Amino acid sequence: MITEDKKEEKSLNFIEEIINADLQSGKYTQIITRFPPEPNGYLHIGHATSIHLNFGLTKKFPGYTNLRFDDTNPVTEDTEYVENIKNDIRWLGFQWENENYASDYFDTLYGYAIRLINEGLAYVDDSTSEEIATLKGTPTEPGKDSPYRNRSVEENLALFEQMKSGAFPDGSRTLRAKIDMAHINMLMRDPILYRIKHAHHHRTGNKWCIYPMYDFAHGQSDAIETVTHSICTLEFAPHRELYDWLIEKLGIYPSHQYEFARRNLNYTVTSKRKLLQLVQEGHVSGWDDPRMPTISGMRRRGYTAFAIRDFCDRIGVAKRENMVDVGLLEFCVREDLNKIALRRMVVLDPLKVVITNFPEGVTEMCHSENNPEDISTGNREIPFTREIFIEKEDFMEVPSKKYFRLAPGKMVRLKGAYIIQCDDFVKDENGEITEVRCTYIENSKSGQDTTGINVKGTLHWVSAQHALEVEVRLYDRLFSVEDPSSEEGDFKDYLNPDSLHVITGYAEPALLEAQEGEAFQFLRKGYFAKDPDSTVEKLVFNRTSTLRDNWAKAGN
Ligand code: ATP
Ligand code: MG
């Protein structure tokens, strides 16, 4: 009840305010938004904020959101990306109303181009791209008219038809809008609408050898779909004038463009082009490498959709670009995992402990809760035997003052089992401790009355005989500097060389049942998720996150 009220009170972001006003004034009775990915890579955390915004608006207000693939660039696009993008959006928890493709509108767009030519608002230009650039002028100097600017409508129609039928090679001609070569907005200086590209398109095959430019596809597709609020990132603000001009001249549905600030995260790159380089050059195992900021990478690592949505909620929508701390995303992940993760014990760096007063060959079943934050998950059985493993770091020959773990003469509790006392230890010829010898205290099992025994430390442990050997992949941030893209040289020079450590862990048997997509907390070690590389012989776990923010502690 209280949370509901709070939600209501939460102030609207600037886009929600615009929509709210539009609905209240009766300008619209419902709104239509769209998420428009180019299928040339996998979605990343930046896209997640855009998805969350576009779909979130139509959850909050009446209306719906379309998924539109902005597939006007045949060379870099692929159906593999289309399928993964759809999968990622669904996984994030959103459902689109219509699945559209800009390429489905190629015929309509061609018709629009003819309409502009007929109105004297577009012309075929034979200039090379260099000539076009030279004539364009600069922000402070007006451009100059192309020598082809005043062709007749008939000539333009004939040439554009020839462009379409494949009569000309790539780059030899373009179709341009006829606006104003002295316009203060450089994008209004006769922008290119169509270019020639003899390339196979993943949906239209070889039907077309001319393709519309972004500016002649995006707004027009919005209008075809009667999108009311077309939301894009700030770098498109200067395009809005052209967006409006084209809609007005074509007399099509008046969609409106609104801009919000791109979301950038520190220690991360969020550019598909750069992420593609990491994949192609083998710096990561693929788009879904758990270190990647892609949705598929984060999912594989064990991030939850809820945590990502929560993160998007918390950062909100901004008008100005700023860097978001990746620590906030990690915080959201921990918050959610703490609530849902099943607790398990896994020893990552084993030291053998022999309980000398516990009989050989006997297994006693202990019980411990699956998740103290959610008692409905019940308890699990944990086998206890004479020989167990604890972490090496949980034993000190000469303990420091505040060390509450195991040391000669000291007692600790084994989680879910008994209190043990250390009597002795064994060293090898190199002076390394290879075995610790303890006695357990009868009647000290978890749940039994142990008043009078003062034990401060609780350790995780596994029965040596029952331990499963599992592969554990420990990840750290992929980059070692805050903003790898703005550093000198190549962004890849700043890859963190310690972003992956693969070790063997010793797990309690309950982990045999682990499912992909389930969240685990390995006690005292962090949150983990089963990796799809797991086989029947060998389970593989990814560390989703540590229990605390180690970077913040280190002063980073
Ligand atoms: P990239 O630079 O990674 O290729 P893009 O903007 O070219 O990104 P698109 O597939 O064209 O990728 O983007 C689809 C939608 O997602 C667009 O509306 C775009 O503005 C938005 N988007 C992409 N990156 C971010 C980001 N970092 N923050 C917010 N929105 C983003
Ligand atoms: Mg783009």
Image (cartoon, helix red, strand yellow):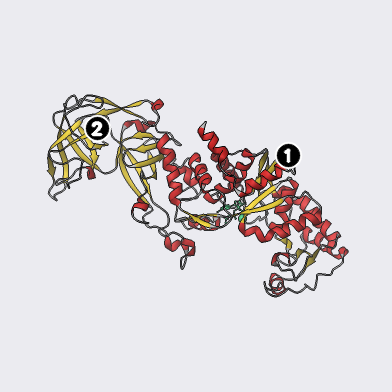
Say above or below: 554 vs 347: below
Residue 449: quarter of image = top left
To which residue does mark 2 refer?
A: 465
Residue 60 location (% of width, % of height): 62, 39
Left or right: residue 42 versus residue 105 is left
Classify the position of ligand 2 by quadrant: top left, top right, bottom left or bottom right: bottom right
Q: Residue at x 64, y 58 (%)?
A: 236
Secondary element under disc 2, as helix, strand or loop, is: loop
Q: Residue at x 18, y 40 (%)?
A: 406
Residue 183: quarter of image = bottom right
To which residue does mark 1 refer?
A: 29
Mark 1 belongs to which amino acid?
Thr
Location of the C terminus by quadrant is bottom left
Secondary element under disc 1, as helix, strand or loop, is: loop
Of circles 2 and 1, the one toward us is: 1
Instruction: Examine the rendering and report whether any part of residue 39 can be seen.
Output: yes
Left or right: residue 328 versus residue 119 is left
Q: Residue at x 46, y 68 (%)?
A: 488
Closest to the observer: 330 or 275?
330
Residue 104 location (% of width, % of height): 72, 47
Say above or below: 174 vs 82: below
Residue 403 location (% of width, % of height): 20, 44
Q: Residue at x 67, y 49 (%)?
A: 230
Mark 2 belongs to which amino acid?
Gln
